[in-house]
Image (cartoon, rainbow, N blue to C red):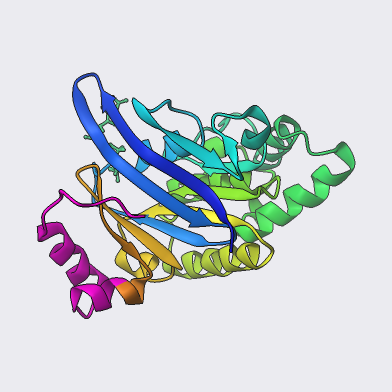
Amino acid sequence: MSTFIEMNNIAHSYNKETVLKDVNLNIPEGQLFGLLGPSGSGKTTLVKILIGLLTPTSGTTRIDNEKMPSFSLMQQIGYMAQADALYSELTARENLHFFASIYRIPKKHQKERVTEAARVVNLTDHLDKTLEKFSGGMKRRMSLAVALLHQPKLLILDEPTVGIDPVLRASIWEDLRDMQKQGTTIVITTHVMDEAEKCDNLALLRDGYIIAHGSPDELKEKSDTETLEEAFLKFGGANHANTGNR
Ligand SMILES: Nc1ncnc2c1ncn2[C@@H]1O[C@H](COP(=O)(O)OP(=O)(O)OP(=O)(O)O)[C@@H](O)[C@H]1O
């Protein structure tokens, strides 16, 4: 598989606080890749840099061989942020049509895409409600629907299943797998171990460093542990000095 995402020597500071330190990532096309790390480890900062929303203090990012930020590439990325950026006075359908226009989905395909995205997140029966009547979990599902509306080549999901019940969570994972089968590369941030287990490959992030990377099985094997949680703790206890992941 060819490399789709390449992040080299990424470092980032907010004011004087350095929150990412020499991060290197290679993600092949079509992978479901997880960034696993505790709160504050730098996951959101890293994905914002990845999609070109944030300029790193140093380092470069290439997606599909193109240097980020690239306007044309941004059109092919679906990003689900942690905070929902939706219009609460509009209905779910109106929100989806609004974003479909922003993504420049041709008018004749918009209805079909809105219907499909609503199906994936199980909101078909709520399309005509305004979002002010939605629960927190329903808004998360709406944000996910917006992120996958334009069938992006790259889907980035920042803790997508927080506030989503286990049944829907399982069905969303099935849909992510389907999208992956159709060639979508998916990067997901999580601090939930059972979600991390479902990823093809993982980077473990702690205090702005990648402390280990590999498939869930490789990580357990390398650390000689039974669970990812134990693996994380074991890698986290190791020296941070030699953590480039290439
Ligand atoms: N805009 C900002 N200005 C200053 N500091 C920030 C800003 N955004 C994040 N930080 C700091 O950077 C560090 C990494 O934050 P980040 O949101 O990337 O972590 P995270 O792993 O995504 O955490 P969480 O799982 O809680 O979302 C934290 O110490 C946070 O306080």
Q: Quadrant of residue 184?
A: bottom right
Left or right: where 83 falls relative to 107: left
Left or right: where 208 falls relative to 98: left
Q: Point out the residue furthest to the right here.
A: 108
Does the magenta-highlighted stretch encompass residue 204? Answer: no
Q: Quarter holding the N terminus?
A: bottom right
166 or 234, nearer to the observer: 234
Residue drawn at 36 percent across, 46 percent down: 24
In the image, is residue 54 above or below residue 95?
above
Horizontal and vertical percent position of residue 131: 56, 38
Horizontal and vertical percent position of residue 92: 65, 41
Q: Quadrant of residue 54?
A: top left
Q: Does residue 2 appear in the picture of this structure? A: yes
In the image, is residue 220 above or below residue 22?
below
Q: Quadrant of residue 104?
A: top right
Q: Does residue 159 appear in the picture of this structure? A: no
In the image, is residue 217 above or below residue 18?
below
The region drawn magenta spans 219-246
148 or 214, nearer to the observer: 214
Instruction: Locate ligand 1 by image quadrant.
Output: top left
Does the magenta-highlighted stretch encompass residue 240? Answer: yes
